Image (cartoon, rainbow, N blue to C red):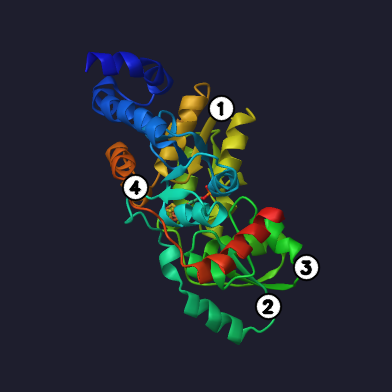
Amino acid sequence: MQDVLTRTAPLYDRVRRVIPPAEWAVFADDIDAILELKRTRNAVILAHNYQTPEIFHCVADIVGDSLLLAREAQTVEADVIVMAGVHFMAETAKLLNPTKRVLMPDMRAGCSLADSITAADVRLLRQRYPGVPVVTYVNTSAAVKAESDVCCTSGNAKRIVESLGSDTVIMIPDEYLAQNIANETGIRMITWAGHCEVHERFTPEEIRRLRVEHPGIVVLAHPECPPEVVAEADFAGSTAGMQEFVASGKASRVVLITECSMSDNLAVLHPEVEFIRPCNLCPHMKRITLPALRHSLETMGTEIMIEEHLAVRARQAVERMLAL
Ligand code: 13P
Ligand code: SF4
């Protein structure tokens, strides 16, 4: 064990501000094993901004928001991609780099948005609104993407919607993201009643109370939050947008209205910034743990497979997004 602690000591130096020594003693063995397994399997780990700091800062090779993970997945040269994120992210990586083995450490890591809509629902919307373009959030299954014209993420939704040149757009399945983009662009949105179970719980009252309790704080909200929450914030953007805002040095005290690990990960990178932390946990993101990643690399499971007839059409929707 002493060897393991010595080998992993430089990694602990990165995260000691957010991980107590007693917790590190539990993590170190898995971290050491994962680093070795990545070498022997020729694997890379892609980690979303909502992963816990010991994953995000200590074993991941590529970290970022959904858009960056999709872009980077395209050019991975290693044989194996392990997704430290949720199922739709692993599917997107497989769509964009189909010859690689893409592993999902826990198949239960879903998403309330992805679960809210089926391919049949999209076909019905098309019948009901013929000729109206369908923009689908990446937080969906490959089958739903396959029925769509183009995908978007929270990082590029405005640009994608505006690029269509249509006064009406079917934007699914996140009702709040669609309403927030409608407010920004003036484009009429036909939406769906899907919500992110993490962001829908924030309220405007909570933000107003935080401003009273912490005078001078800057409030950054994710656009999956309800519009009345976004209206109370100083800035709304994807997780990468929030990171850029913090890195710009515009605020010394911030509150991130999003998933809990985001503040921990940014606190590691920006010790000069004070983070106030009322946050909500994503139970799906939290299914990915060090033991789950280790087990995935040991057993090479669970491999993501997408039926070819779906993959061809879903890939088109994702590639159209990346081309814009
Ligand atoms: P972004 O990282 O693209 O902002 O997405 C947030 C999210 O909820 C992903 O599940
Ligand atoms: Fe889905 Fe929300 Fe969790 Fe992201 S944070 S995976 S949108 S439930």
Give me the C-alpha separation between circle 1 and circle 2.
44 Å
Dot 3 crowding, Cα within 10 Å, few <14, some 14–19, many 20+: few
- State the residue position of label 3: 165
Residue 132, disc: 2
Label 4 vs label 2: CA separation? 38 Å
Which residue is rendered at x = 67% and y = 73% of the image?
133
Front position among marks 1 and 4: 4
| For residue 4, side relative to residue 129 (left or right) | left
Residue 49, horizontal then vertical, whole percent: 48, 41
For label 1, the residue is 252
Q: At label 1, which amino acid type do we have?
A: Ser
Query: What residue appears at the point 62 percent right and 64 percent down from the top-left corner?
Result: 317
Disc 4 packing (10 Å; few <14; some 14–19; many ≥20): many
Task: Specify which label sits upstream in the sequence, 1 or 2.
Answer: 2
Q: What residue type is disc 2 on?
A: Val
Q: Which of the image's four quarters has the N terminus? A: top left
